[in-house]
Image (cartoon, rainbow, N blue to C red):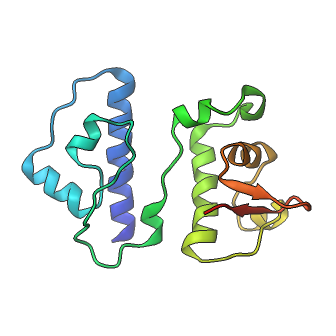
Amino acid sequence: MKGIRAALENTMKMVQALQQHTDLERFPLSEEEQAAAQQLTCQTAKEMESPAEEAFCSGSTIPGLSEESLFKPLTEEILLTVPRSVRSTVKLADLNNFYRELFNHFVVNKNRAPLSILQMNKMNMKATDSRIQILKELAIVELDKQGNVKLIV
């Protein structure tokens, strides 16, 4: 069920992003669609009209809301705040995948020990210096003296 919710939420976000980038006309959600969006803890129609706000539905009707739903992916606007020399050629989708894996490791799985690049790569996180530096620049992660990464929560 969580997988279906995540897929639907991602689909809604992708449609919203496509509408914003292509300047397509956005139609308001029907009552049935709004109810479904609220049950899936997705953004409501009002929030879709003002995409600058990252607020999600409050008062969710789904009991036991997991920490994974607290994950907020990075946007193109946020990525552009990082200097070009740090950003290099990192793709937003790859960065968000890496960030989600770190988030799941530290928040969802409640691990506290910092991770080395070698440990992250063993866990198939596809860690690179560029991705780590971008997250560090955005104050999402911190590095210790040995270069181990820890998520700032």
Q: Is residue 70 left or right of residue 43?
A: right
In the image, what residue occupies the spot 63% across and 70% down? 106
Above or below, comparing residue 89 to residue 117 in the picture: above
Q: Position of residue 35 (x, y in %)?
A: 14, 57
Identify the image quadrant of the C terminus: bottom right
Q: Is residue 138 left or right of residue 119?
A: left
In the image, what residue occupies the spot 61% across and 54% down? 99
Labels in figure, total: 0
Identify the image quadrant of the N terminus: bottom left
Q: Position of residue 4 (x, y in %)?
A: 34, 63
Q: Is residue 39 left or right of residue 138?
A: left
Above or below, comparing residue 143 to residue 28 in the picture: below
Q: Position of residue 43 (x, y in %)?
A: 29, 50
Q: Position of residue 49 (x, y in %)?
A: 26, 35
In the image, what residue occupies the spot 28% across and 57% down? 57
Instruction: Name the residue at the left extreme.
Output: 31
Q: Nearer the viewer, residue 119 or 145?
A: 145
Instruction: Name the residue at the top extreme.
Output: 23
Q: Quadrant of residue 18?
A: top left
Above or below, comparing residue 116 to residue 32 in the picture: below
